Amino acid sequence: MIHCSNLMKIYKLNDDIEVIALQGLDLDVDKGELMGIIGSSGSGKSTLLNILGGLDRPSAGKILVDGKDLLRVTDKELVDYKLETVGFVWQNNARNLIPYLTAVENVELPMLLKGRHKRERAIELLEMVGMGHRKHNRLNQLSGGEQQRIAIAIGLANNPRLLLADEPTGSVDGKTADVILDVFRNLNKSLGLTIVIVTHDTQLMKKMDRVVAIRDGKTSSEILRRNIYENYLNEMEEEAEESHVELAVLDSAGRIQIPSDYLEELGMKDLNKMRIELEEGQIVLKNPNIR
Ligand SMILES: Nc1ncnc2c1ncn2[C@@H]1O[C@H](COP(=O)(O)OP(=O)(O)OP(=O)(O)O)[C@@H](O)[C@H]1O
């Protein structure tokens, strides 16, 4: 569904200053995946999500989403892409919802932009996210978690193939966050929808199939759920932490980012070179100062 390789995004602030928000990011997401993106503040998560959502254009590299080349699309194609291929759920509900419209009118709005008006479909979507009973309520009559579920229904209004969410549980408590994640999981399973969620929430991460970490505008590691534990995990969610295995990402040029805590633990943090050896089918990195 998504293929990014060596993706770059450079913001030009003025003639002298440029900010490199993405520097050669590699990422592949399969159709039907529910995956998370994590990373510290400023690492490039929102930049990536905005590019995937067609809200911003990349500077260089390669990016294909559902077969569309987002580096080369025309402005008109990008408008169609935003209306047809992708749905967005923001952390800030003021960005998701229009306060003076009811829940069902909010869900109908993106359909109107595409020239369709389908009340039944809007109600069906609200039911899918467990909000059918609040369809005639306005924003101020709903809790933060309820508003967020309506935002998900809005994101689905034009039947996107990819749903993107930026910190969708950022402003709700842990229990509500769980309910919201369950909504995403159900949509992922029942519709086979590909979902990418940016989150800081470690509880949410444990429930995803795959979590990719971004550091300094590059994908640095992946945490995968081990299939053998999959069924067991569904019942024993609290065991999730031990069931994930962390993989470092190897980019197309053969570069790998080693977690800084590993380097620190081995006293190798300040080294700028390592000895690399092939030992019995394994690649081993050694401190060059120790023989
Ligand atoms: N429109 C912009 N103009 C200039 N620089 C930008 C712009 N948007 C983002 N940046 C810069 O790009 C880098 C990556 O920002 P981004 O917002 O993608 O990070 P993030 O990982 O989403 O952070 P946070 O978790 O704080 O939202 C940062 O250095 C940021 O200052």
Image (cartoon, helix red, strand yellow):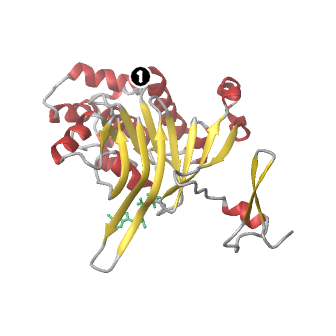
Judge left or right: residue 207 versus residue 75.
Answer: right
Q: Position of residue 219 (x, y in %)?
A: 52, 53
The residue sitting at 78% across, 64% down in the picture is 265
Q: Quadrant of ligand 1?
A: bottom left
Residue 163 visible at all: yes
Vertical arrangement, residue 85 with respect to residue 70, above or below:
above
Judge left or right: residue 168 versus residue 224.
Answer: left
Q: Amino acid at mark 1?
A: Leu
The picture quadrant where one finds residue 119 is top left
The picture quadrant where one finds residue 99 is top left
The residue sitting at 44% across, 44% down in the picture is 168
The picture quadrant where one finds residue 97 is top left
Q: Which residue is mark 1?
A: 191
Residue 92 visible at all: no
Q: Dot 1, how many residues are within 10 Å of its Cα: few (below 14), some (14-19), or many (20+)?
A: few
Q: Secondary structure at mark 1?
A: helix
Q: Position of residue 37 (x, y in %)?
A: 51, 47
- Quadrant in the picture for the N terminus: top left
Vertical arrangement, residue 97 with respect to residue 254, above or below:
above
The residue sitting at 33% across, 25% down in the picture is 125
Q: Position of residue 234 (x, y in %)?
A: 65, 26
